[in-house]
Amino acid sequence: MDSKKLALLCRDLADNKKAEDLVVLDVRKLSSVTDFFVIVSGTSQPHLRAIEEEIHSKLRDDHDLRPSRTEGGGSTWVVLDYFDVIVHVMHHETRARYDLEGLWGDAKPVNPPKPRRKKSPAK
């Protein structure tokens, strides 16, 4: 799976658990460490854990992907490192304090492809 598809999948998996303020940043031209950041917010530690577990378990079970490293379990900022995609699951206050979007302000946001709508049959 290419890195952009993985980033969008991580975003969608976070959305399954009602993560808020979902952002995917393309940092390929700015960083040699990774291709994409996925940044999402949760409202509490249990919510952060649910988001983290959804991403981790679905990627493991459905795609045989495991993070090379996980940091911050049980805190207000969890990082899942999938090499080309780094997922940040953050409490709103922590996210505001560290302002990753501002720090990586030159990164291009990745907008999801618009879903195709079925055309209504011609009358």
Image: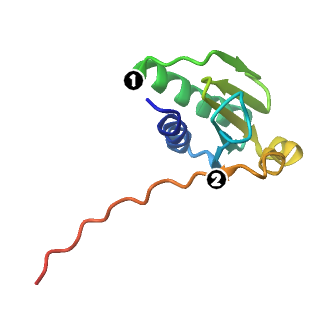
Residue in the foreground of this view, choosing between 13 and 35: 35
Q: Residue at x 72, y 28 (%)?
A: 78
Q: Earlier in the sequence, mark 2 or mark 1?
A: 1
Residue in the foreground of this view, choosing between 74 and 84: 84
When asked about the image quadrant of residue 15, the answer is top right
- In the picture, the disc for residue 62 is 1
Label pair 2/1, CB-CB below 8 angstroms: no
When asked about the image quadrant of residue 116, the answer is bottom left
Q: Which element carries disc 2, helix, strand or loop?
A: strand
Vertical comparison of 71 with 19: above or below: above
Q: Which element carries disc 1, helix, strand or loop?
A: helix
Which amino acid, by three-letter code, is at mark 1? Asp
Residues at marks 2 and 1, CA–CA distance in whole angstroms: 26 Å
Q: What is the quadrant of the N terminus in the image?
A: top left
Residue 77 coordinates in the image, percent (x, y):
77, 32
The residue lying furthest to the bottom in this view is: 123
- Left/right of residue 26 with respect to residue 112 in the rendered view: right
Vertical comparison of 122 with 105: above or below: below
Vertical comparison of 65 with 16: above or below: above
**Residue, disc 2:** 109
Q: Residue at x 79, y 27 (%)?
A: 75
